[in-house]
Image: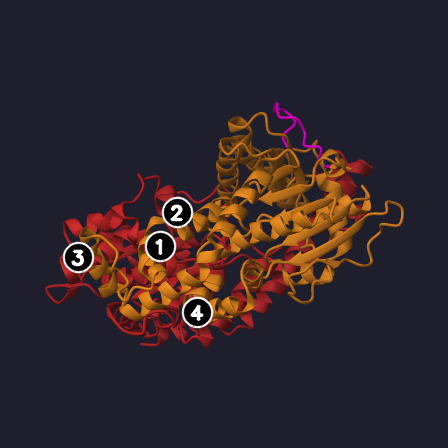
Chain colours: A red, B orange
Amino acid sequence: MGAAQRPTDRTGIDWSARLHVVTGKGGTGKTSVAAALALGLAGGGRRTLLVEVEGRQGISQLFGTDPLPYAERPLADAPGGGRVSALAVDAEEALLEYLDMFYKLGAAGRALRKFGAIDFATTIAPGLRDVLLTGKVKEATTRTVDKRRVYDAVVLDAPPTGRIGRFLNVTAETARLAKIGPIKTQSEGVSALLRSPMTAVHVVTLLEEMPVQETVDAIAELTSLGFGVGRVIVNGTRAPLPAGGLVTEAALARGLRAAGLPAGEEVVTGLRDEARDLIIRRDLEDSLRTDLAELGVPLVELPLLPDGVDRAGLETLSAALVHGA
Amino acid sequence: MPSDNAAPPLDVDRILADPGVRIVVCCGAGGVGKTTTAAALALRAAEQHGRRTVVLTIDPARRLAQSLGLTELDNTPRQVKGIDVEGSGGELHAMMLDMKRTFDDVVLTHTDPAKAAEIFANPFYQAMSSTFAGTQEYMAMEKLGQLHARGEWDLIVVDTPPSRSALDFLDAPARLSRFLDGRMLRLLLAPARTGGRSMFSLVTASFGMFSRVVQKVIGTQLLTDLSGFVAALDSMFGGFRQRAEQTYRILQARETAFLLVAAPEPDAVREAAYFAGRLRAEKMPLAGLVLNRVHQPTVVGLGAPESRAAADRLAAAGGHEGTVEVLRAHAALAEQAVREQRVAARFVEAFPQVPSVSVTAQPADVHDVDGLRTIAAAVSRR
């Protein structure tokens, strides 16, 4: 309980939350990280659910499957008999399902859709859309069959950092609009789960200026709204350069000759310029890493996968996430 | 990009110098340097081509905003000082979009102060003007329309919002106007317009069941607020739609040039290709692709395998540690360049006619005018 908020050392990374919300600036790879986490948490015969809510079909693109329907489908097997299922939550479908649960709509539900009523309802009140999406996530997280939880963990590929506070803060958004009624009750239930120790919000970043700035901002916002921040996941990191600084031109020329390579002035200055740029970049990355460390949230670093994230790459990320390797 | 493809190089200077081009729209996925590119091109238009330029940024990095003198978000263009326009006679103005304020201004222009106050106080307006999905996109286009209508600038450079999908800003105006003008709203509005007591008094019986469900789900208070909101906005419907259509037409006109901005990464390139297809379908003028953050070794004669093998040989022999590192760095860079070319080639294959230009990755982020100038020169291949 509450472990998600406590710093943990690298050897025993604690992912004990049941709902993992994964956010990050666009382009940082949050979908891949969410998928890797779902895969990692399914190890040892566990069941996990990977959920997306933005209609991007990022999961199916990543796994090379057909577009996900609004239904939980097996997505991938994990070592030890575990399994990851996937779900693309659609606000319209969630609303119809929700209405059906409470009002037994049947054909009337289809009429609602025909009228454009659902698009209308979720458009006029964006908070309503979010409460429907998070409501479905809550339902999956807490669902039990024969008093056993259906999923050991649910991983949500959440909206990006710029919108995460509003997305999770469903009560505030709907309270402005719905003073009473089922929407209000629903949003209160969702809010209680999201603010409980069962939920941890993880922020994915790269060692680049804008993503780090957004990470810092998002953590401040999430904390002030009362959400438990789990980890900062630094994606795309590279092995550190050996200490020693930039080689001199003379030493480089000698080295190149020793290796039997051309060592003309153009080659020497060119290669040295490349190395210098790399050092500048890495120094910047180091200072950004320091900024992140100062947040006091545990960091997990994931290696850069030069050839993109395929299934083997996901396993690599997954191992790094769960075992800190 | 790769020199072996058929696409002509993109000549950005020709676009920036062309007096017939009044609007440049930079679009693409998030995180590819869209804002920086927009700012750099605007700076170049002012400094090199003597144009009175304004750049509309959506959500610039703080230090970039500061370098443009954008210390406050006041929703009006401010002249950027300290740039080199003595020779050219150009000017650079910059502004950051304030979504809510732009929406407020739209309301104020279309209605009297009393009605406006009523609208501002409505919870629906408050929700919509700050969180409506697409409001930022819509307001970016609204602001573009306003700047264009003022006719004060030779060139307007627009950055587009970091949307879920880069297409949102094209769809938002139509969606908003469809919404404000839609059948649902008309139905809800009918009683409010006639001053009826019940929300649905004028609606047919078949709609009765539906209305009961709506009332159950969203609550009566919500409907009352909504009705008030819609009634207050009623006078503005025509205005909204008209403006959305106007902006759409401006985007199709010859005075507009769309520049796709991407990085050589699979997602960004896929997004760019999707966008290119969409622009073609909408008959909007796509001028070219700016491929940012491209890695290119300075030393081209030494291939990655050769460099790596030499590094291994040296490392095994001992000594020359500095050279080993340099050779490994070079190999990694050369490999990255090859990978990036492969990714970028996907766009070229799909859109061989679209001119493109590659911009080499900068070792550090850009947040001053000198940095923007360097970027602009690179985009212009000068």
> Chain letter of disc 4?
B
Magenta-colored span? B1-12
> Chain letter of disc 1?
B
Query: Where on the picture, by quarter, is residue B355?
Result: top right
Which amino acid lies under the numbered mark 3 shown in the image of this protein? Asp
Query: Which quadrant is home to the N terminus of chain A?
Result: bottom left
Q: What residue does disc 1 label?
A: B185
Which amino acid lies under the numbered mark 1 shown in the image of this protein? Leu
Q: Assess disc 3: are there few (<14), some (14-19) or many (≥20) residues with their C-alpha within 10 Å of its C-alpha.
A: some
Q: Which mark is residue A188?
A: none
Query: Which quadrant is home to the C terminus of chain A?
Result: bottom left
Task: Estimate the spatial distance between the alpha carbons at disc 1 and disc 3, rounded to whole Å.
Answer: 24 Å
Judging depth in this view, the residue of A192 and B371 nearest the camera is A192
> Chain letter of disc 2?
A
Q: Assess disc 2: are there few (<14), some (14-19) or many (≥20) residues with their C-alpha within 10 Å of its C-alpha.
A: few
Task: Evaluate whether label 2 is on the same chain as label 4.
Answer: no
Task: Estimate the spatial distance between the alpha carbons at disc 2 and disc 1, rounded to whole Å.
Answer: 28 Å
Q: Which mark is residue A56?
A: 2
- Observer-side mark, 1 or 3, equals 1
Q: What residue does disc 3 label?
A: A100
Which secondary structure dominates the residues rendered in magenta? Answer: loop
Q: Is residue B190 left or right of residue A104?
A: right
Which amino acid lies under the numbered mark 2 shown in the image of this protein? Arg
